[in-house]
Image (cartoon, rainbow, N blue to C red):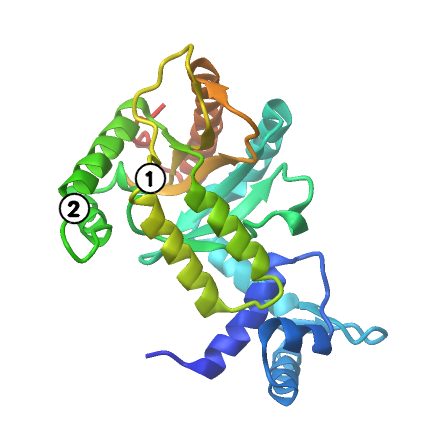
Amino acid sequence: MFSKPTARALAILDLLMAHPHKAFGLTELTRTLNLNKATCHAILSTMTTYGFLIQDERHKQYRLGPSIVAAGNAAFAQFPALEYARPELEKLTSELGIGCGVIGRSAKHLVLLANYGIPKPLDFPFQLGLRLPNTGPLGATFIAWSPAKALEAWLQKAQPSEFDDKLDQRLRIAVIGIRARGYEVTLKTQAEQDLEVALSNGRLNWSLEQQAQSTELYREALCSEEYHLNRIEPDRMYPVCNIAVPVFGRGSEPELVFSTGSIDGSLSGKQIAEIATQLQRAAKNVTLAAHSASGLDTQPPSSF
């Protein structure tokens, strides 16, 4: 059941999470979120009263408050490996000269939890908290190490109204390749460019519903494009979008995914392998650190 009042409050939090270094005034918020001024003011006042927002007394602008920090820390505890990711990825972005992100998942969404090495985060369309559908072809790095039942559900949800045998085969081949080599490689697509435009336009009219529609259209468009790179030849050049590796926590399935971003131009197969190796090294260090801190004696699943 959908609740509009709840969605309005969440839209405010979502906007502020996506722009963590920016404060918003009432007028700007009402315009960006397309809310009635009185309604928006009532929500902001309530959220400020309970510490989820802070209002600057001088400029009367709002930003995230201490209750969000507490909520974030509580959520942070659900991803033990995330604690050890920052130093590894900050080092990696410096070495590679490209941005790196950390992706988590829920039943329905893939969520960008952190990014590093992006010089102008406010100008980058893929903001913190961005949610993408956790449905094929997205989320393949997670699903490659998931049980067969989860794989079949992921494949089924990717299907349009009429079963597409070629899509099913393509996704199965992609997952097999990811599991075999230990990392995922995706290619630049028109769908990605269209999503960037949609998300950029969303800054002027921030809507959770519109974002959900845009990301679902993106997912559907990927189903008809060459998205996964399955065969990689060392000397051939490829228009790479992302390279992603799994990060394991307490269980046998990936807890997080480390992914590159901000890749300009094309990469050779050799360069892809070198970047993937560095990502895997960082993921392994984080995985082992999380296991050690949790007192786990078992080794994480091998993907390195």
Residue 250 in sight in this render: no
Mark 2, secondary structure of its residue: loop
Say whether disc 2 or disc 1 marks the residue closer to the N-terminus: 2
Q: Residue furthest bottom?
A: 38
Q: Which residue corresponds to the image point at 72% horizontal and 77% vertical from the top-left? A: 27
Tell me, for residue 225, which label it has, or none: 1
Q: Amino acid at mark 2?
A: Asp
Q: Residue furthest right?
A: 58
Picture coordinates of residue 71, whole percent (x, y): 53, 64
Viewed as shown, does residue 77 lie left or right of 250? right
Picture coordinates of residue 67, whole percent (x, y): 60, 69
Q: Amino acid at mark 1?
A: Glu
Picture coordinates of residue 258, whole percent (x, y): 46, 36
Q: Residue furthest top?
A: 235
Q: Determine whether 301 is above or below 165 in the image.
A: above
Q: Residues within 10 Å of mark 2 (few under 14, many from 20)?
A: few
Q: Which residue corresponds to the image point at 40% horizontal and 63% vertical from the top-left? A: 213
Tell me, for residue 290, which label it has, or none: none
Q: Which residue corresponds to the image point at 56% horizontal and 52% vertical from the top-left? A: 127
Q: Quadrant where the C terminus lies?
A: top left
**In this figure, which residue is indicated by the disc labeled 2?**
164
Q: Determine whether 172 is above or below 194 in the image.
A: above
Q: Quadrant of residue 109?
A: bottom left
Tell me the CA gap for discs 2 and 1: 14 Å
Who is closer to the viewer here, 113 or 295?
Answer: 113
Q: Which residue corresponds to the image point at 39% horizontal and 51% vertical from the top-left? A: 218
Q: Quadrant where the N terminus lies?
A: bottom left
Who is closer to the viewer here, 115 or 83?
Answer: 115
Mark 1, secondary structure of its residue: loop
Q: Residues within 10 Å of mark 1 (few under 14, many from 20)?
A: some
Q: Determine whether 281 is above or below 146 in the image.
A: above
Tag 2 near tag 1, CB within 8 Å? no
